Amino acid sequence: MARKRKLLFISVKNTWILNSANIYIMNKSIQKIVLVGIGNIFNAVLGFAFISAAAKTLDLDSFGKYALLATLLVATSKLIDFGTNSVYVAKSISTEDKSLLNTFYTLKIILLLISIPISVGVLLLFKFNDLKIILYFVLGLAAYSINYTLNPIFQKEEKFFNLVLLNTFPALIKGTFAILMFTKSINPSLTQTFEVFSLSILSSTLMITFLPRKYKQFKFSALQTLNLLKESYPAGISQLIYEGWPSIANSIAKIAKDFSSVGIFSIAEKVTNILTLASVSVFTVLLPKNAYRKKQHMEYDFKEILSISTLIIVMAFIGTFASEIFISRFLGEKFSQSIPLLGLLIFASAFTSIHTFMEHYFFIEEKTKYIMYISLGKLIVFLILSIVLTPILSLQGIAISNLVGALIALFSTMILIWKHQGKKKAILTQP
C-alpha cells in the first residue's frame, strides 16, 4: 500500500513538473512574440505615418499610383524569398547541414537576378515608364534581397531583437519624412515619395555587422540550389500570393476603376495591417521553436495556436471600431469611401493571420505543398468573386471577396492539419 502511494506521489510530481515546464516554455514563447509584435507594431506605426503623410500630401490619383508602386515592389521582392527563408530555418535546425548556408546565399543572388527583369516588365505593363521610378524600384529590390537574407539568420539564431531592428532603421527613415511632410517642411512629388519608400530599405544593411562570424563567410555554390528551390517553391508560390495580395487587390481596383479607387482601397487595407503583423510575429517565433521541438521528438503545441487565434479575433472586433474613428477624424473626407470597407477587410485580415501562422506546421512537417494548394485555392476564389461582385458592388465587392477567400483558406488549413495529424497517429499506433 505504501509502495502504491509512493508511485502515485511520483506520478503526480512528474505530471506537475511536466506541466510547469510546458507553462514556462509557453510563457517564453509569449514573451518572444510580444517582443517581435511590439517591434513590428512600432515599425508599422512609422510606416503607416508615412503612407498617411503621402495620402495627405499627394492628390488622390498620385497617391493611388504610389500605393500601387509600393505594393508591387513588396510583392515582386518576395521572388527573392520564394519560400527559401522558412525552409532554410527549419532545415538548418533539423539537419545541421553546414553547406546549406552557401546554397542559401547563392540562391538569393540567383533569385535577385531573376526578379529584376520581371519587375521592369511589370512596371511597363502598368505604364510606369519613368526611368527614375524604374531605378528606385530595382534598387529597392536589391535592398530587400539583403533584408531577406539577414532575416532568417536572426530567426534561426532566435535573435529576435536584431530581427526587429532589421526593419526599424527603414521605419525610422520613413517616420522622419512623415513628420517633415505633416509639418509641410517638404512637399515631395510622387517620384520622390516612392524614392523614400524604396531606398529606406537600404538602411537594413547596417545589421550585417551584427551577424555571427560563421555567417560572414560565403562560397558561391550552385550544386544544391535546385534542390533547395524544389523544397521551397510550394511555399514560395504561397508567399507570392500572400505578400502580393495587396497589389493584386489594387490592380483589380485600377482595372475596374482608376488610380483614385486604388488610393481609397489601399488606405483601408493599410489600416488592417496590424493583424497581418500579428501573424508575422507569431510565425517568426513559433517556426524555430517547433522545429526544435520536432528535433527533440516532442509533440506540436496546438494549445498555443488556439490561444493566439482567440486573441486575434478579439483584436479584430476592437480594430473595426477604432479604425473607423481614425479614418474619419484623421484622413478626412477624401478617404470617406474607405470606411465601409474596413470591417470586411479587418476580419479578412484576422482570418488570414490565423491561417498564415498555422501554416508553419507544414514547414515543420515538410508538407509545404499544402500551403501552395491553400493559397492557390484562396486566390482562385478571390478572383472569381471579384469578377462577379466588383461590377455590382464596386470596391466593397473586392472586400467581400477578400473575406470569403480568407475564411476558405482558414478552414482548409484546419482540415489539412487535422487529417495529417490523424495519419501520424495512425502510423504511431500501428503494431
Image: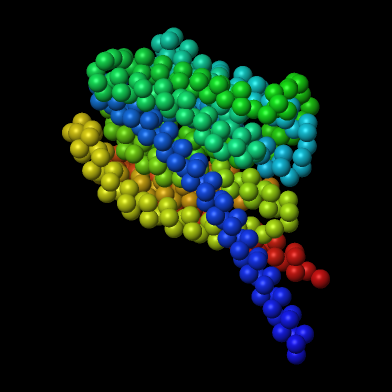
In the rendered image, is residue 252 in sight? no
Query: Where residue 263 sits in the image (x, y, percent)?
Result: 30, 29
The quadrant of the image that shows the C terminus is bottom right
Looking at the image, which residue sits at the far left?
Answer: 333
Relative to 14, say whether 128 is above or below.
Answer: above
Q: Quadrant of residue 255?
A: top left
Residue at left offset 78%, top offset 69%: 430
Quarter of the image for residue 224 reads top right
Decide if residue 192 is on the left or right side of residue 201. left
Q: Nearer the viewer, residue 151 or 345?
A: 151
Residue, x 78% and y 31% (percent of image)?
99
Q: Residue lying at the far top in this picture: please name it.
A: 131
Q: Give the colour scheme of this rendering.
A: rainbow
Quadrant of the rendered structure where residue 276 is? top left
Residue at 55%, 61% (x, y): give it: 303
Most foreground residue, 165 or 279: 165
Percent coordinates x, y for residue 284 in the rendering = 56, 42
Judge by depth and name the residue closer to the eye, 40 or 110: 40
Q: Residue furthest right?
A: 431
Q: Is residue 93 left or right of residue 349?
A: right
Image quadrant occupied by the N terminus: bottom right
Residue 196 x/y as whole percent: 40, 18
- In the rendered image, residue 424, in percent from the top left (x then y), is placed at 70, 61
Q: State whether residue 345 appears in this view.
A: yes
